[in-house]
Amino acid sequence: MNRYKHRMILTPAAATLVALTVACGNGRADSGAVTVPQPVTGIDWRVDSLTVGATTRHAPAAARLRIDEDGKAAGNLGCNQFSARATVHGDRITFGDLRTTRMACAPERMAFERALSRALTTGTLVAKSEDDRLTLTDGDGDRIHLSRNPAE
């Protein structure tokens, strides 16, 4: 078979295979349902806990996070208020430098605040949302666990 005819046969076959892969690759095998990611922006999130290595710390009640659609992020690190720029691309979130107030709180709240600040700004975070919960994971595997603020 000459090369021209060979290409004419393979090109439609390849296009069909790609279309089938895309059409079938997004569903779950058990139910056939398609998982649609929940939005991350425009929601008031309560920080529940922070897992660094094998240690999980529960967040102070004040810890909050909100990322607006225009990239403005703000919240509370556990003691101090903060604001920052956030870039959201799909499930990837990157925070710029945090601007914070400078109040002093109990040592355990300040330790949580330093750890949360570090987790937010060490690089790009991967967001995974399910129902009313959100997990942000950094490149080291450290996780910020959040839930939708019930006051919303």
Image: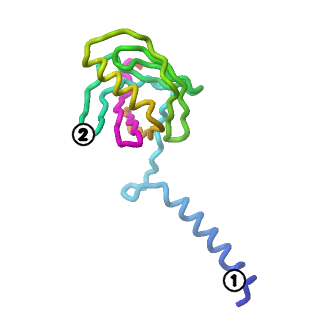
Q: In the image, what residue occupies the spot 64% across and 68% down?
A: 15
Residue 5 locus on image (x, y percent): 73, 84
Residue 14 lies left or right of residue 83; in this view the side is right
Q: Residues within 10 Å of mark 2 (few under 14, many from 20)?
A: few
Residue 128 locus on image (x, y percent): 41, 40
Residue lying farthest to the bottom in this orientation: 1
- Disc 2 secondary structure class: loop
Which residue in the structure is indicated by mark 2?
Answer: 54
Task: Give the quarter of the figure containing the N terminus.
Answer: bottom right
Q: Which mark is residue 6?
A: 1
Q: 84 or 73, which lies in front?
A: 84
Q: 145 or 8, which lies in front?
A: 145
Q: Give the range drawn in magenta.
A: 134-151
Residue 148 among those drawn in magenta: yes
In the image, residue 66 above or below residue 8: above
Q: Distance between the residues labelled 1 and 2?
A: 56 Å
Q: How crowded is mark 1: few (under 14 residues within 10 Å), some or many (20 or more)?
A: few
Q: In the image, what residue occupies the spot 24% across and 39% down?
A: 54
